[in-house]
Amino acid sequence: MIKLIKMYFNTFSGLSREVWWLALITLINRAGTMVIPFLSLYLTTDLNFSLGQVGWIMSAFGLGSVAGSWLGGKLTDKIGFYKVMVFSLFLSGILFIWLQFLKTFNLICLGIFLVMTVADLFRPAMFVALNSYSKIENKTRSITLIRLAINLGFSAGPAIGGYIITSMSYGGLFWVDGITCIAASLVLLKVLHPKKVKVLDDYKNMQPKSAFTDFPFMIFLLAMILFGVIFLQYFSTMPIYYKEVYGLNEKYIGLLLGLNGFLIFIIEMPLIKWLETKTFTKTGLMLFGALLTGLSFIILNMFSWVGILIVGMVLMSVGEMITFPFSNAFALQQAKRGNQGEYMALYSVAFSISHIIAHNAGLHMVDGLGFNTTWLLITFLAVLCVLLLMFLNLHMKRRKNLGPHFEIEL
């Protein structure tokens, strides 16, 4: 047992002090994001909105995320990642607290849009910061550490959030989310001021190319949009599925969602370090992760046993913990071709577009077609995602074999 514990902690060795601080800030921030997994339930049960209305509200969530991610990338290239991160965390904390006082459909759409615009300024800035604070050989593990912090926060958040809802009300969730965002901004101000930190990777492309002309990156983004649509069903339609089909209450839904974060906390870093020692390509690993995530939906229509929900969550979690770190590492790798803020903004925008499509389409499909047909359609999207990643994998192998002069520009 002691040997296993030592091996686990050795997987974290070599990461920079700044990456650890960035992970702690992310943990503080994400520990309060218990609002997000329960947002669809809050809107339907507490405010009595229809599934169709919730779908449009979640689309406003996605639109705000697109706007914030794109603007965050632009600002990062102009004024630097540090200022963008501080501003985003502090102001989004205030906006999350304000959000609970909005009760009408139009105001909530506007409020959600503004909150996500400000909150998602943080994402491209954080990715560029992570790239600067990491040695080249440690980038994928640095990404994994940040994801570990995110998922540790998410594993605690839903479980605590479910308890708060059942014992108090939804209002407390907004207060916790807002306060933790503000707290994260204060920690960032204290420990990651530019005058106090060391940049480990200051690579600058003096002749940057637009990300829009990078053919494999565009294929990659399309695949990530599809993967995001599939993955995000676990945070919009799936909680409703748990409640309506299996009769689970918020407490058990929170624990089931928390299982995702717990598995990632225990398994992801050792898994990533092991995968990095093998000859697998980043694109090949993303492909495998997408396969597992798609399989997690197939089995829902094959079995009616309540335990299949746990099996599905495990499959999705393993698929996620393979796909996201290596997709992020692939994006950082491609970003060396141009302005890093632009590349990482587009990477963030891909998942923001997923938010626009996933929640609205998923909820409308459930409302009109039922859960079983919805899961079949989601599986079809998973097949398309896998095919795109297969094409990308073959393209990158061919480009590697033919050398740097092999390019397809858009």
Image (cartoon, rainbow, N blue to C red):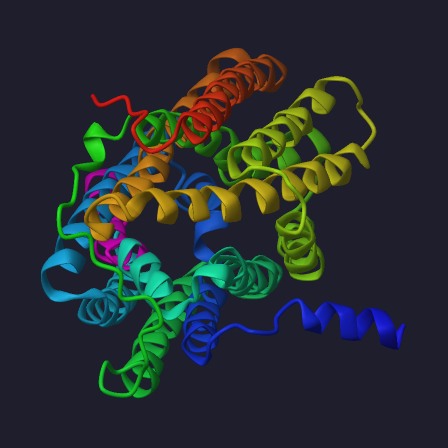
Q: Tell me if I can see residue 165 in this picture.
A: no
Q: Position of residue 237 (x, y in %)?
A: 52, 32
Determine whether 53 is above or below 118 in the image. Answer: above
Nearer-the-camera pick, 148 or 44: 148
Nearer-the-camera pick, 42 or 329: 329
Residue at 51% across, 29% down: 230
Q: Position of residue 13 (x, y in %)?
A: 61, 74
Side of 317 where 333 appears, left or right: left
Side of 406 where 394 appears, left or right: right
Side of 353 where 164 appears, left or right: right
Q: Position of residue 404 (x, y in %)?
A: 33, 33
Image quadrant assignment for residue 293? top right
Residue at 22% across, 23% down: 409
Nearer-the-camera pick, 83 or 249: 83
What segment carries the magenta color? 103-123
Q: Tell me if I can see residue 322 in this picture.
A: yes
Nearer-the-camera pick, 237 or 150: 150
Side of 286 where 256 appears, left or right: right
Determine whether 127 is above or below 8 in the image. Answer: above
Residue at 69% across, 50% down: 252
